[in-house]
Image (cartoon, rainbow, N blue to C red):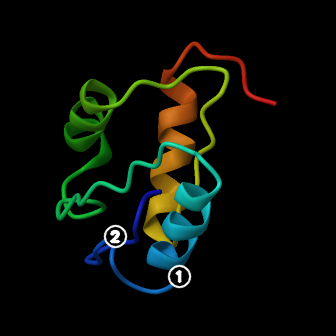
Amino acid sequence: LFHGTSAHPDVVWLPWLRGRLTERGYAVEAPHYPSLNVEPIATFLPTVLANHTFDANTVLVGHSGGAALLLAILEHIETTVD
């Protein structure tokens, strides 16, 4: 779960969704990236890619600026997306 620009993973509906997914047995990552959409994506994206593993079972959810980050992630991973 990726929060929006200048936000935190503990705002809006992200905590609710994290809780529901965890209750259902999913492993959930909700990192805090204060530089999201503050630093240029070319500078910031390598940090995100280095800190997370994306495979065929990964479900990506982004709020606001986090959704834009997900599009950049999808352009840079080799995993097939359904």
Tell me the residue at 25%/31% (across/down).
Answer: 51
Residues 69 and 82: in front is: 82
Q: Secondary structure at mark 2?
A: loop
Tell me the residue at 40%/67% (across/down).
Answer: 3
Cα separation, mark 2 vs mark 1, equals 9 Å
Q: Position of residue 69 (x, y in %)?
A: 45, 51
Q: Secondary structure at mark 1?
A: loop
Give the residue number, with chain letter if any, for mark 1: 13
Q: Residue furthest right?
A: 82
Residues 82 and 17: in front is: 17
Q: Residue type at mark 1?
A: Trp
- Circles 2 and 1, Cβ within 8 Å, touching? The answer is no
Answer with the quarter of the image where residue 41 lies: top left
Q: Residue furthest bottom?
A: 12
Q: Position of residue 50 (x, y in %)?
A: 25, 25
Relative height, residue 48 to residue 40 (above, below): above
